[in-house]
Amino acid sequence: MSFQSKNSDSNSTRSKRFDLDSHLTGAVRGGLRADPATGALLTPIYQSTTYQQEAVGVHKGHTYSRASNPTVSALEEALGVLEDTPPAVCYATGMAAISGLFLALLKSGDHVVLSDVVYGGTVRLFDQVLGHLGIESSFVDTANPAAVKAAIRRSTRMVFIETPANPTLKLTDVEAIAAITRPAGLLLVVDNTFLTPLLLRPLDLGADISMLSTTKYIEGHNATVGGSVASRDEKILDRLRLIRKTLGSIQSPHEAWLTARGIKTLPLRLQQHSRGAQVVAEWLEQHPDISRVYYPGLASFPQHELAERQHALHGGMLSFELKQGADAGIALMNAVRLCVLAENLGAAETLITHPVSMTHSDVPREMRERIGITEGLVRLSVGLEDPRDIIADLSQALDVARRSERVAVPSPQEV
Ligand SMILES: *Cc1c(COP(=O)(O)O)cnc(C)c1O
């Protein structure tokens, strides 16, 4: 039985956006169908390349696992329940999803407008691949709808936004951008990896496509890589599946099974990630060594009003800077014990990342500086540990950072 919502009037849309409980049943039961052969409650891992056909042209819907696989289909249905769409299209990684959707929907000579603060891999995709194929791009401040409007050319086909953006958490008002793309006949794509369809509903706000790196909150346990693209437009979905089969970038059944398991606890995890991040952000904000904290749930966040209008909870990602600058930030990251120094985000374990040397090292320096990714910026993916333990760890690491800075750069009086 699947729990696809039939009701998409604005009241239910509103409740889906602001009532996490309304997703509990869909998360646990969406796409769940006892295995017809054995009664196994969970869709098994169908580890099979091919499928025996009953007669020429007669089969049960799957023919070759590069085109489709029953375990992957179960995950796609579960994601469709979360997104309120037909089954999503799942890919081997989030980057395979992003490159799959650009290659499916764009051609040489087309132009795309993208958020200037965007996942590093998306920037590299344009620099190293799509640019060479004649697909043009403009990276603009999508927090400013007028900048998006000004960047649109005759050849523009798509606007691609990331909100909250990685790693400064800058928000884009999805409805305001949809009000530009809809009348112009442009596709609006939202990379919704940070909030997931449980906290941000891009398709209800007027976007055409919702894209996820399932590697992050969706699977949530630091165990897989994967990506998903959802839409309510069947023509888009058909085209995505054709190009995925052509490029060979489908998700593997084992990863799909783990990801589907992660979805069952997604509402519960997002609640705790958001609660923990709020507590840690408020603590950091009052700490004397911290100069800035970026978290949409803070009253001091420049777009706090938009955050409250666009999502009820603000997820587990935050970033901050130390007053003593980059060296102190690096010393802090080297001194943590509970927080794990690693790339990735959205998992049970709290992860701490230095965007300049890790996730955003390929973003040109000039662009990094313009969008606020400073040398000293620290990104924190608040996990599911007791927030008091996360704070205690950051506190001891800040103490180390303060001392190490003094040793590294003696003040003039001490020399
Ligand atoms: C991680 C991430 C991606 C890429 O996903 P992978 O699964 O690592 O390929 C894309 N967008 C955002 C916002 C991400 O955080």
Image (tube, rainbow, N blue to C red):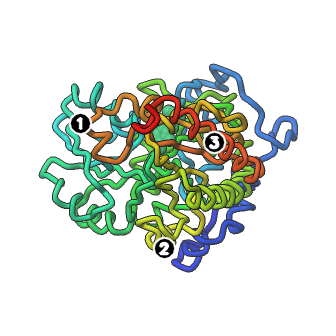
Question: Is the N terminus in the top left, top right, bottom left or bottom right quadrant?
Answer: bottom right
From the viewer's side, name the closer residue of 199 and 297.
Answer: 297
Q: Position of residue 213 (x, y in %)?
A: 53, 41
CB of mark 2 near ligand 1 (< 8 Å): no
Residue occupying image coordinates x 59% and y 27%: 63
- Label 1 vs 3, first from the N-terminus: 1
Residue 399, disc: 3
Find the distance from the CA under tag 1 to the CA under tag 3.
53 Å
- Quarter occupied by residue 106: top left
Residue 404 position, x and y percent, is 56, 32
Of 33 and 137, which appears nearest the observer? 137
User: x%, y% of residue 179?
Assistant: 30, 69
Q: Who's the residue at 52% across and 30% down the image?
A: 407
Find the residue positioned furthest to the right.
39
User: What residue is pinned by disc 1?
Assistant: 107
| Residue furthest left in the image | 154
Q: Earlier in the sequence, mark 2 or mark 1?
A: 1
Q: CA distance from mark 2 to mark 3?
A: 37 Å
Residue 241 can be seen, yes or no: no
- The residue nearer to you, when weighing 73 against 138, is 138
Q: How far apart are the alpha carbons under marks 2 and 1?
A: 36 Å
Does any atom of ligand 1 lie closer than 8 Å to the CB of label 3?
no
Q: Amino acid at mark 1?
A: Lys
First in residue order: circle 2 vs circle 3: 2
- Amino acid identity at mark 3: Asp
Q: In this rendering, would 136 be left or right of 188?
A: left
- Where does residue 44 sit, x and y in percent of width and height? 77, 33
